[in-house]
Image (cartoon, rainbow, N blue to C red):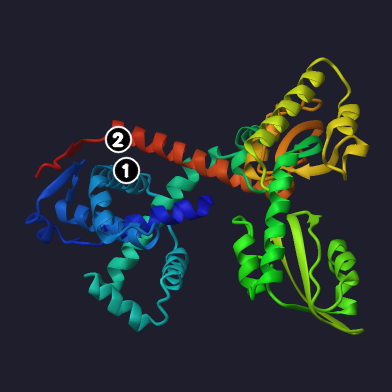
């Protein structure tokens, strides 16, 4: 990550100083800033602003108008960075840092490779378009490498990262790091939203109405099924003709097997309660090898009264927990989760990243041995308990990732501090109004 930053610095130095390099040409341009014995012209700064606008469009997907507006807003910041880069280059020249011909040649080859320039002739043509010769480019490359050596010598040695800093960064930023998440041994008590008898009676009345329509009128079963289907599940297979072999039928839900096994062709079942509501089946054809059937579902709507009853039950259970009663015992007594209530509501070990965002926010705040307030979902209310919490050790790859982030942050801090010291000892006059 640090190498990329240094390379970016070198490229910026190259681009911002390759506009009008001849002193005679710059004389006729407006001056944006004086930097010791050098100047920044308005045209050079305009080039930098244009480059930033292009970057905002291509990399950050700004519109052309938004990119231009934002780049213009950053004009002062771009000038500040340019001045710092100029002072770095000046310091490198003052210190008489040396660069070999081999290093310059390697720089040029890497530059050509980065911008997919395949031949020397293509490179020469591109330089001419920028108003440069190969000799001038080599001279600028040498200066850039000297500035890079200055950065590498003054700043990079300060970028060491300790293990304690890596761990601290992880603890403070774990939510933003996709590579790692705590694992928790989780339990719950689930209070379901159950339909009242009034809710059930209303659903059964709907099923009888559907049966009467089938028996007394020439009603299309598929249209009827869609009319009664749940609004939450509009793409259900309900109403569609399903043809299943005996083997295929054996893999269907148990409720399908039980009802269809007892129905003959052209028969319609009574209402059968299942996971999604009340089912009504009709067999169209049937023989020893295949059954063709349709079905519809009348949802068991949960009334506001039923929801309120579940909320009151969850408050009652929570109060018992607050009074010190055993979580396992309460789960066995009150939980509506048939799969977990007999073993104390155990959900097993879960990574926080596996949980939906709302549930994760509840669990993240719980320490080992703590339980949550009742947490309401579409199907009911959960009281979660964290038996144990485990923060896995960071792998070497994850340590390297965090090290790269910290080194990048520190590089920017050190670069700012060092160039601040150069600015403090330089003559600089900003003339942006011109």
Q: Residues within 10 Å of mark 1 (few under 14, many from 20)?
A: many
Give the answer, above or below, for where 252 lies relative to 242: above
Q: Is residue 5 left or right of residue 371?
A: left
CB contact under 8 Å: marks 2 and 1: yes
Q: Is residue 371 left or right of residue 398?
A: right
Q: Quadrant of residue 79?
A: top left
Secondary structure under tag 2 reads: helix
Residue 96: horizontal and vertical position, in percent? 37, 48
Say if residue 190 shows up in the picture. Answer: yes
Say which mark, if any, is on residue 84. 1
Which of disc 1 and disc 2 is earlier in sequence?
A: 1
Residue 392: horizontal and vertical position, in percent? 77, 40
Say if residue 174 shows up in the picture. Answer: no
* Residue found 12% across the figure and 57% down from its top: 26
* Residue found 84% across the figure and 66% down from its top: 256
- Residue under circle 2? 423
* Residue found 83% across the figure and 42% down from its top: 337
The extreme top residue here reads: 323
Q: Quadrant of residue 423?
A: top left
Q: Residues within 10 Å of mark 2 (few under 14, many from 20)?
A: some
Tell which of 280 and 219 is nearer to you: 219
Secondary structure under tag 1 reads: helix
């Amino acid at each position: 990550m640090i190498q990329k930053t240094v390379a970016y610095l070198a490229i910026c130095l190259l681009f911002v100083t390759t506009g009008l390099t001849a002193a005679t040409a710059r004389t006729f341009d407006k001056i944006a800033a004086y930097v010791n014995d050098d100047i920044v012209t308005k045209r050079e700064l305009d080039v930098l602003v244009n480059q930033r606008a292009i970057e905002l469009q291509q990399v950050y997907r700004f519109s052309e108008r938004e990119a231009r507006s934002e780049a213009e807003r950053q004009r002062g910041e771009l000038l500040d960075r340019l001045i710092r880069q100029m002072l770095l280059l000046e310091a490198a020249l003052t210190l008489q840092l040396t660069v070999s011909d081999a290093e310059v040649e390697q720089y040029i080859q890497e530059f050509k490779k980065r911008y997919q320039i395949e031949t020397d002739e293509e490179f020469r043509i591109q330089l001419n378009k920028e108003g440069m010769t190969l000799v001038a480019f080599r001279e600028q490359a040498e200066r850039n490498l000297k500035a890079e050596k200055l950065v590498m010598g003054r700043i990079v040695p300060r970028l060491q990262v300790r293990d304690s800093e890596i761990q601290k960064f992880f603890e403070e930023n774990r939510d933003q790091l996709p590579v790692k998440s705590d694992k928790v041994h989780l339990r719950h008590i689930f209070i379901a939203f159950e339909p009242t008898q009034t809710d059930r009676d209303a659903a059964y009345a709907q099923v009888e109405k559907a049966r009467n329509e089938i028996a007394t009128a020439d009603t299309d079963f598929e249209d009827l099924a869609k009319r009664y289907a749940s609004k939450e599940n509009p793409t259900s297979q309900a109403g569609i003709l399903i043809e299943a072999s005996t083997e295929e039928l054996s893999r269907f839900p148990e409720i399908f097997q039980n009802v269809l096994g007892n129905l003959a062709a052209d028969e319609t079942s009574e209402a059968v309660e299942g996971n999604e509501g009340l089912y009504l089946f009709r067999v169209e054809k049937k023989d020893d090898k295949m059954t063709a059937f349709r079905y519809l579902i009348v949802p068991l709507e949960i009334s506001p009264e039923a929801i309120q009853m579940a909320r009151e039950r969850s408050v009652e259970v929570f109060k018992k927990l607050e009074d010190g009663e055993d979580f396992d015992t309460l789960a066995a007594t009150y939980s509506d989760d048939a799969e977990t209530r007999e073993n104390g509501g155990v959900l097993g070990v879960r990574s926080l990243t596996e949980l939906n965002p709302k549930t994760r926010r509840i669990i993240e705040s719980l320490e080992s041995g703590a339980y949550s307030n009742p947490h309401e979902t579409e199907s009911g209310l959960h009281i979660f308990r964290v038996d144990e919490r485990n923060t896995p050790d960071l792998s070497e790859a994850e340590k390297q990732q965090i090290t790269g982030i910290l080194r990048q942050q520190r590089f920017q801090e050190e670069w700012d501090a060092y160039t601040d010291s150069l600015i403090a000892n330089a003559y600089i006059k900003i003339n942006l109004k011109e």
